[in-house]
């Protein structure tokens, strides 16, 4: 893995500064290529081809250059095809395969890549930059364009080296407080954008124009001609092969192990292919965690005889929040960033690559949100018209608990309302109290993504795979592992598995209340029975306990500082939240606001060259 950066003019000192800020992403090597029209830079974490794999790399005529972050798992097969077409290679790396694939197939080369990637190709013959991002958005890529300067990087903090005027995107804050992340192409920075997943961008160096195009999508066309047993075997083979190709590495490799079905299946398949015990890492909280999975991860470690390491997350861990906010820069307010980073930091002592079970819950209906809509329904005895009338006076209701109940009930009127309710950490009905300006209706934004005549399970799957996974979960894993100079790989998010899962009947994902039904069948011979019988339990960071104990004083101070942002959030709302910050109903809102204030102080008030101190 690496950090890449560049812009459309020549400046060696500036490209060096951009890359230095991403040294954690690639501590092994700094490389660059310059001419009068462009500057390309990379910080490399060496995983494949440790000897000849340095970057930037070029083609035979040295008129096309590339900087690349990621791994292409099918690069050996592609190389064989390209060699038959008389392409000549001077390295053994997957990077050079991308370069020759671009020469051979042009923009359509991205359709042939299987992996996780973000790259930039400089084509001097066509005088353009060609940037692309992988199918599922596993690797980040940001850009800025003001009509003249075009700048891109793996992390936003590197783009800020260019003395860009820093303005907060107020609509993005609205999305962040509702979802814990900013979806689509937006970021919290006005004028700085994400390249969306499964997309490429072409910047014409002559006329200074941008073109963005999507190159892949999945659809929910159900296959009805196969039996459940046939589909079970297909899925097992897909997962097994996906794990196998992700074991490609010239450095030590291991896995994150929670003790759930997903991570256990990954470890089980790894054990089949590796000649030595799988290196596994798991964690548990010192105290107060909603869930402790320690006994399950130990059971799996013993079952597969892994080289197992456990670590304890202590209640003082919140102190690293400013550092993690700096690493995120494209803010997400998921409290699990703390344990993920600490586990990655610990794992880095033994390995450079870790496989994870991420993605299976979203693909195969593993979260309770997929079936809550069938359980928590609008009560028939409660008339709707009186509720609609009461909601007109919602902002004048003095009791916060009553407001919470009424808003929850109001968002349960239909199955569609209930499904959207479960995606939100804050409802639009509360926004008048929060923002001193008009904001978009997030619930309507979500509804606009719903596909006509699609069942509710696949509606939620579609949202998760296109919005939540790339913008929240993948960025949490990428940025927290790369902060520790560790590469994470996610076999379940192979686009072949995603395409396959979209094609099966929804009742094979959620059968009555059995979540991940087809996955359980597929890994039955791999996963221990005790794990297979487990109900899904969400990973829970004890933030409510932390807010009441170690963070009690500092949370109050941070919220006080946030009241100064009167053009962004109403001080009266912050004061109300501060009074209720120990109430479990408000813990997520409190956490979101604390994270936003730390982000604001790091990137708007300060120079963003390093984390702030709290």
Image: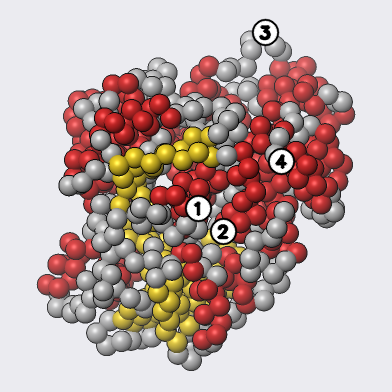
- Residue 612 occupies quadrant: bottom right
Could one spot residue 300 in this view of the protein? yes
Mark in front: 2 vs 4:
4
The image quadrant where one finds the C terminus is bottom right
Q: Position of residue 602 (x, y in %)?
A: 69, 61
Of pointers 2 and 4, the one earlier in the residue sequence = 2
Pointer 4: residues within 10 angstroms few (<14), some, or many (20+)? some
* Lateral position of residue 79 relative to residue 255, left or right: left
Spatial separation of the CA atoms under disc 2 and disc 1: 7 Å
Farthest left residue in view: 84
* Lateral position of residue 125 relative to residue 78, left or right: right
Q: Position of residue 589 (x, y in %)?
A: 70, 38
Identity of the residue drawn at 58% across and 65% down: 156
Of pointers 2 and 3, the one earlier in the residue sequence = 2
What residue sits right under mark 4 in the picture?
A: 551
What residue sits right under mark 2 in the picture?
A: 327
> Considering depth in this image, is 443 or 277 the residue closer to the camera?
277
What residue sits right under mark 3 in the picture?
A: 381
Pointer 3: residues within 10 angstroms few (<14), some, or many (20+)? few
Spatial separation of the CA atoms under disc 2 and disc 3: 50 Å
Vertically, is 158 above or below 304?
below
As helix, strand or loop, the secondary structure at mark 3 comes to loop
Pointer 2: residues within 10 angstroms few (<14), some, or many (20+)? many
As helix, strand or loop, the secondary structure at mark 2 comes to helix
Identity of the residue drawn at 51% across and 86% down: 12
Is there CB contact under 8 Å for labels 2 and 3?
A: no
């Amino acid at each position: 893995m690496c950090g890449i950066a560049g812009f459309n003019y020549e400046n060696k000192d500036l490209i060096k500064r951009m890359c230095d800020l991403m040294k954690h992403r690639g501590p092994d090597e700094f490389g660059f290529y310059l001419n009068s029209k462009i500057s390309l830079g990379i910080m490399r974490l060496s995983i494949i081809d440790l000897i000849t794999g340095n970057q930037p790399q070029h083609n035979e005529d040295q008129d096309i250059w590339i900087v690349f972050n990621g791994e292409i798992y099918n690069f050996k097969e592609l190389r064989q095809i390209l060699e038959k077409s008389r392409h000549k290679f001077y390295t053994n790396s997957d990077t050079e395969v991308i370069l020759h694939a671009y020469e051979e197939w042009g923009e359509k080369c991205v359709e042939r890549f299987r992996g996780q990637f973000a790259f930039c190709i400089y084509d001097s013959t066509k005088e353009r930059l060609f940037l692309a991002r992988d199918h599922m958005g596993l690797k980040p890529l940001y850009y800025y364009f003001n009509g003249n300067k075009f700048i891109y990087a793996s992390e936003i903090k590197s783009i800020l080296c260019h003395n860009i005027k820093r303005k907060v995107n107020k609509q993005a804050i609205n999305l962040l407080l509702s979802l814990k992340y900013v979806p689509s192409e937006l970021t919290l920075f006005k004028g700085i954008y994400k390249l969306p997943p499964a997309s490429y961008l072409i910047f014409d160096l002559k006329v200074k124009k941008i073109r963005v195009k999507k190159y892949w999508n999945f659809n929910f066309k159900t296959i009805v001609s196969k039996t459940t047993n046939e589909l079970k075997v297909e899925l097992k083979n897909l997962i097994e092969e996906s794990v196998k190709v992700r074991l490609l590495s010239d450095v030590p490799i291991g896995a994150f192990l929670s003790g759930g079905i997903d991570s256990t299946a990954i470890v089980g398949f790894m054990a089949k292919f590796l000649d030595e015990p799988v290196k596994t890492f798991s964690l548990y909280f010192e105290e107060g965690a909603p869930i402790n999975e320690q006994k399950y991860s130990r059971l799996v470690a013993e079952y597969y005889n892994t080289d197992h390491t456990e670590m304890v997350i202590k209640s003082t861990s919140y102190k690293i929040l400013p550092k993690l906010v700096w690493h995120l820069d494209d803010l997400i307010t998921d409290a699990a960033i703390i344990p993920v980073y600490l586990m990655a930091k610990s794992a880095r002592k033994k390995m450079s690559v870790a496989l994870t079970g991420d993605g299976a819950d979203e693909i195969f209906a593993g979260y309770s949100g997929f079936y809550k809509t069938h359980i928590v329904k609008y009560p028939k005895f409660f008339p709707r018209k009186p509720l609609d009338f009461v909601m007109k006076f919602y902002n004048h209701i003095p009791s916060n608990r009553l407001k919470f109940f009424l808003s929850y009930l109001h968002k349960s009127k239909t199955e569609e309302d209930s499904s959207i309710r479960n995606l939100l950490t804050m409802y639009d009905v509360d926004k008048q109290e929060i923002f001193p300006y008009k904001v978009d209706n997030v619930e309507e934004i979500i509804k606009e993504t719903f596909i006509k005549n699609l069942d509710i399970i696949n509606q939620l799957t579609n949202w998760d795979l296109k919005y939540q996974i790339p913008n929240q979960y993948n960025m949490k894993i990428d940025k927290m592992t790369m902060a520790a100079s560790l590469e994470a790989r996610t076999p379940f998010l192979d686009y072949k598995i995603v395409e396959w899962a979209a094609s099966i009947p929804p009742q094979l994902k959620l059968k009555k209340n059995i979540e991940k039904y087809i996955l359980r069948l597929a890994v039955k011979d791999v996963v221990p029975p005790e794990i297979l019988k487990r109900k899904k339990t969400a990973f829970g960071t004890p933030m409510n306990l932390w807010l009441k104990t170690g963070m009690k004083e500092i949370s109050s101070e941070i919220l006080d500082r946030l009241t100064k942002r009167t053009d962004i959030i109403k001080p009266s709302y912050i004061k109300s939240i501060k009074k209720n910050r120990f109430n479990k109903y408000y813990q997520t809102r409190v956490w979101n606001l604390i994270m936003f204030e730390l982000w604001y102080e790091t990137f708007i008030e300060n120079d963003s060259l390093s984390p702030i101190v709290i």
